[in-house]
Image: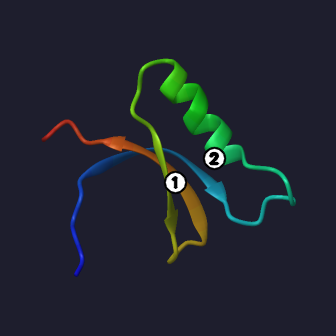
Amino acid sequence: MTAAISAKVLERFPAGSPRGSWPAEEYAARRRAEGEPATVVMDLDSDAFLVVVPADGD
């Protein structure tokens, strides 16, 4: 089963970061500290981590 979820991409990070480096998670944590419900997801097609927030219901 596949679910379509509408989200806004705040930032993209390449998946090939050095071992022990989590820039997407760190960025999302900063956004959450500022009150945004940021989540990290993996875009398999582009091999990147995306930091997303729910779309505003456009």
| Numbered label attached to residue 3 | none
Q: Which residue was labeled with disc 1? A: 50
Residue 8 is situated, as x and y percent measured from the top left of the image, at: 34, 45
Type of amino acid under label 1: Leu
Of all residues shown, which one is farthest toward the front? 1
5 sits left or right of 23 in the view:
left
Residue 47 is situated, as x and y percent measured from the top left of the image, at: 60, 72
**On-image quarter of the C terminus:** top left
Q: Label 1, secondary structure: give it.
A: strand
Of all residues shown, which one is farthest toward the right? 19
Residue at horizontal 20%, vertical 36%?
56
Residue at horizontal 53%, vertical 21%?
33
Q: Earlier in the sequence, mark 1 or mark 2?
A: 2
Residue at horizontal 42%, vertical 20%?
35
Q: What is the quadrant of residue 3 in the picture?
A: bottom left
Residue 27 is situated, as x and y percent measured from the top left of the image, at: 62, 36
Of all residues shown, which one is farthest toward the top? 34
28 sits left or right of 5 in the view:
right
Whether tag 1 and tag 2 are in contact, CB under 8 A, the answer is yes
Type of amino acid under label 2: Ala
Q: Residues within 10 Å of mark 1 (few under 14, many from 20)?
A: many
Residue 13 is situated, as x and y percent measured from the top left of the image, at: 64, 53
Q: Label 2, secondary structure: give it.
A: helix
Could you give the CA–CA distance between mark 1 and mark 2, rounded to whole angstroms? 7 Å
Q: Which residue was labeled with disc 2? A: 24
